Amino acid sequence: MTLPCTESGSPPIHSRSLRSADVERWRSEARAITGNRVEVIEVSHHEVRARLDGNATLWRDIVRDGVTVYGLTIDELVEPVHA
């Protein structure tokens, strides 16, 4: 899930508590629906490409099995940015 952030990659201060509540509600509902534990990982847009290109098992699994719920797809996150 992708949420709005400032240029520094952080959410605006006024939206952080609302965002935390929304993410927790989503996590709880996803667990109720799937029966599986759901963990939320926050990574800045700048970090995500390096992590998705890395060899860590978690990130390989995300590339292989990840499903975009909202926001950019995994392919869009790793495609080169042209200025």
Image (cartoon, rainbow, N blue to C red):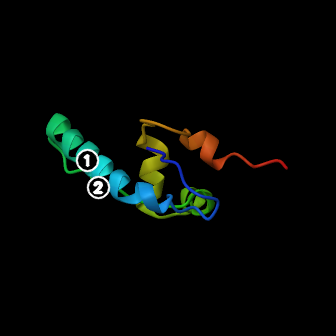
Are the residues tagged 1 and 2 within 8 Å (C-beta)?
yes
Report the front residue among 15 and 44.
15
**Secondary structure category for the residue under label 1:** helix
Which quadrant is the N terminus positioned in? top left
What residue is at 52 percent from the left and 48 percent from the top? 4
Residue bearing the label numbered 1: 27
Residue bearing the label numbered 2: 39
How many numbered discs, if any? 2
- Crowd class of label 2 (few under 14; some 14 to 19; many from 20; radius 10 Å): few
What residue is at 69 percent from the left and 45 percent from the top? 79
Q: Disc 1 marks which amino acid?
A: Arg
Direction from residue 47 to residue 33 in the image, left or right: left
Q: Where is residue 73, by image quadrant? A: top right
Direction from residue 75 to residue 15 in the image, left or right: left
Of the numbered discs 1 and 2, the one sitting upstream in the chain is 1
Q: CA distance from mark 1 to mark 2?
A: 7 Å
Where does residue 23 sit, x and y in percent of width and height?
32, 49
